Structure formats: structure tokens, C-alpha cells
Amino acid sequence: MSDRSPRQRSWLEIRWRELRNPPPPVLRAVLANLAIAALGGALLLLYGRIEPDVSLAPLIVVFIAVVIVCGSALTYLWVELPTGASGVRRRSAWAAILGFFASVPIAYLVLVVVFQVLPSA
């Protein structure tokens, strides 16, 4: 055996490894919210092109509310607590909170893509 300690990784190497191997609950929360937001964003974009003179502000509020509620519910259903015992309650309100915190920035980013990037293309 050698007394060599493991080599120190740079900040970039550590972040790259974290990016390639995200924790499954976080990945599931992001994917659930992204699916809901992408579908809602596509519907908003389609409606905005069909009815160009209508204000979309009320629909954007509904879009954000739907992404938050559905994303939190899907994350609650999809993300289970890691337990070894069978028959134990495997869901928690923390999963819904994780979905909530993932839904807010994802809804914002989808709105930016839908209303700023896509119409100019």
C-alpha cells in the first residue's frame, strides 16, 4: 500500500462530474416540470399565433400556476424516499416542495424561450 492521498480535483472537474451524474430526485423533478412547461409553452405559442391581438397575460398566470401545481404533484408521485424497508410510506411532502422549487425557474425559462427566442426565428 502506498501513502498517496487521492489527487485533488479542480472546481471544474467536480462540477462536470455533478452535471453528468445528477441525483435522481432532482433529475426527476426537473424532467416532470420541463414536460409540463414545454407542453404549456407550446400551447401558449400556438394560441398567440392563432389570436395575435389577444392579451396573453391572464393565460401566462394560468400557465405558471399549472406548471407549479402539476409539476409539484408529478414530482410528489415520481420521487420516492429511499428506504430499505418494504411497506413503509415512501412519499413525502418534501418531494412536492422539490417539485415546487424546480417549477418556478423552469416556467420562467420556458416563457423566455417561447416569447423571446421562438418568435424571432
Image (tube, helix red, strand yellow):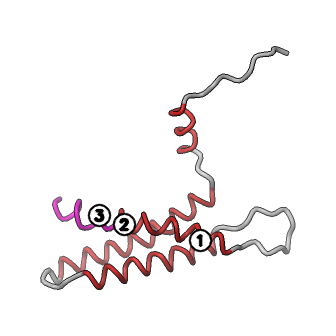
Q: Distance between the residues labelled 1 and 3?
A: 24 Å
Which of the two labelled residues, at mark 1 and mark 3, occupies the earlier sequence position?
A: 1
Q: Residues within 10 Å of mark 1 (few under 14, many from 20)?
A: some
What stretch of residues is rendered in magenta?
A: 110-121
**Can you say which quadrant of the picture contains the C terminus?**
bottom left
Residue at image point 29% right, 85% down: 58
Find residue 62 and report its horizontal and vertical position in percent: 37, 83
Find residue 36 and report its horizontal and vertical position in percent: 44, 73
- Disc 2 secondary structure class: helix
Please, what is the three-letter code of the amino acid marked with disc 1?
Answer: Ile
Q: In this view, does 71 lie above or below 5?
A: below
Return the residue at label 3. Answer: 112
> Does residue 46 appear to the left or right of 19 in the view shown?
left
Return the residue at label 2. Answer: 108
Q: In this view, does 82 lie above or below 39?
A: above
Return the residue at label 1. Answer: 97
Q: Distance between the residues labelled 1 and 2?
A: 17 Å
User: Marks 2 and 1: in contact by CB < 8 Å?
Assistant: no
Please, what is the three-letter code of the amino acid marked with disc 3?
Answer: Val
**Can you say which quadrant of the picture contains the N terminus?**
top right
